Amino acid sequence: AIHEVMEQQTISIAKAGIMTSLNARVSILAAANPAYGRYNMNKSVEANVQLPAALLSRFDLLWLIADKSDREQDLRLAKHITYVHQHNINPPMQHTPIDMKLMRKYVALCQKKQPDIPKELTEFIVANYVDIRNEARNIDNAKSSTFTSARTLLAILRLATALARLRLVDHVEKDDINEAMRLMDQSKDSLRQHAQQGPGRKHKITDEIYDLIRKMAAGAKTLKIQDIRERCTTKGFKPDDIDKCLEEFERLDVWQINQAKTKITIVN
């Protein structure tokens, strides 16, 4: 359904003998959790969230928000959770929040604005889009999980127009275009941040072994390591690669290996 909304701006309804198509011109903000509860940095975005590339490419911005270990952030979050648990209220704010009535009026005023893009910015936009396409062809970006197409240009135009609308002006400025491209670059960088981790061949083998183990489990929570070794060996995987896979995904808390190393218990 969401694919139809983003592609044709309509939604089809078939209920109670009624079949119709309704307009659905809306902005979409979506969030997706990774498959099996852990984001695998060695896989693409499509493989992690298990959504087709044709759908993901229709989003203007894709951000990877990873739960990384950081002492200051962990400490701040732990204090917040502890305070709420003890007092049943949020801790006092360090700033004065904006009144919601004022915010609603501001949003309503922004929605009335329809900024246009001046002709003098056309060459600047086109030149920058061509540069982005050239960068996408570089060897360094050969394994990038993002793809630059005409939709990227449309995304830049939409973002620039939205930025002008936030400033309550009638014309898009050069700074709006630059900021839109900066947001686009930051979005791609969040997906490419782990692209240089280790040799790709070993990661691919461990991922294939992991997928095979998942198929063996078929919903079960425990598997014998001997059965895993036998199945993987028949598929042509080496014993060393099997051990690396078991250790790698144990570190990711996907499964746990008992002390005798005779079985694994799948956690996520």
Image (cartoon, rainbow, N blue to C red):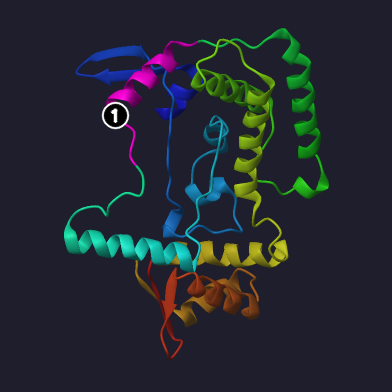
Location of residue 11 with respect to 224 vertically, above or below: above
| Amino acid at pointer 1 | Met
Q: Which of 158 and 173 is in front in this view?
A: 173
Crowd rating for badge 1 (residues with CA inside 10 Å; few <14, some 14–19, many 20+): few
Rendering coords of residue 135 (x, y %): 79, 38
Location of residue 237 with respect to 19 vertically, above or below: below
**For residue 177, what is the image quadrant?**
top right
In the image, what residue occupies the spot 49% across and 41% down?
51
**For residue 187, what is the image quadrant?**
top right
**Magenta span contains residue 110:** yes
Number of numbered discs:
1
Quadrant containing the N terminus in the rendered view: top left
Q: Nearer the viewer, residue 6 or 47?
A: 6
Q: Can residue 184 be seen in this view?
A: yes
In the picture, measured across the screen, residue 189 lies left or right of residue 40, that is right
**Magenta span contains residue 6:** no
**For residue 24, what is the image quadrant?**
top left
Rendering coords of residue 164 (x, y %): 56, 19
Magenta residues, as a range?
96-113
Location of residue 93 with respect to 125 vertically, above or below: below
Identify the residue under disc 1.
100
Rendering coords of residue 5 (x, y %): 43, 22
Quadrant containing the C terminus in the rendered view: bottom left
Q: Nearer the viewer, residue 262 or 200?
A: 200
Rendering coords of residue 182 (x, y %): 65, 36
